[in-house]
Image (tube, rainbow, N blue to C red):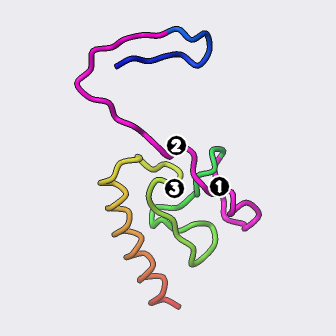
Amino acid sequence: MAVKANKGGKGLRFDVDGVFIFAGLTPNTSCLVGSGIKLDDTGHIMTDLKLSTNIPGIFASGDVRSGATKQVASAVGEGATVAHSIREYLQNQ
């Protein structure tokens, strides 16, 4: 693999077995600014352990959530958790 620096243009070569691309580091939550939903410093949605936001009935899961591990398996698990939390919320309405 060859890497070239953005500044200075110097290049380096590495022998590697694989490269993992990590896309989507910045959450696309700009539409939530001013909505009242609490976001952390990086724009990720803040939730409690049941994946509920600070606004009743609004939930978040996956990579957009503050504290998310950014792993597919975790996001899938959070999907199941949030579905259970939503069902519980609706049953209590």
**Lower sequence index among marks 1 and 3:** 1
Image coordinates for residue 66, horizontal then vertical, percent:
53, 51
- Label 1 close to label 3 by CB (< 8 Å): no
The residue at the point 29 percent across, 54 percent down is 73
Give amino acid for label 3: Arg
Residue that carries the numbered disc 1 in the rendered image: 39
Between the residue at mark 2 and the residue at mark 3, the CA separation in whole angstroms equals 12 Å
Q: Residues within 10 Å of mark 1 (few under 14, many from 20)?
A: many
The residue at the point 37 percent across, 67 percent down is 79
The residue at the point 66 percent across, 44 percent down is 41
Query: Can you tell which quarter of the image residue 78 is in?
Result: bottom left
Query: Which residues are drawn in magenta?
Result: 11-40
Image coordinates for residue 17, horizontal then vertical, percent:
22, 24
Image coordinates for residue 39, horizontal then vertical, percent:
65, 55
Residue that carries the numbered disc 3 in the rendered image: 65
Give amino acid for label 2: Leu
Residue that carries the numbered disc 2 in the rendered image: 25
Query: 34 left or right of 54?
Result: right
Image coordinates for residue 58, horizontal then vertical, percent:
57, 73
**Lower sequence index among marks 2 and 3:** 2
Q: Residues within 10 Å of mark 3 (few under 14, many from 20)?
A: many
Query: 60 left or right of 2?
Result: right
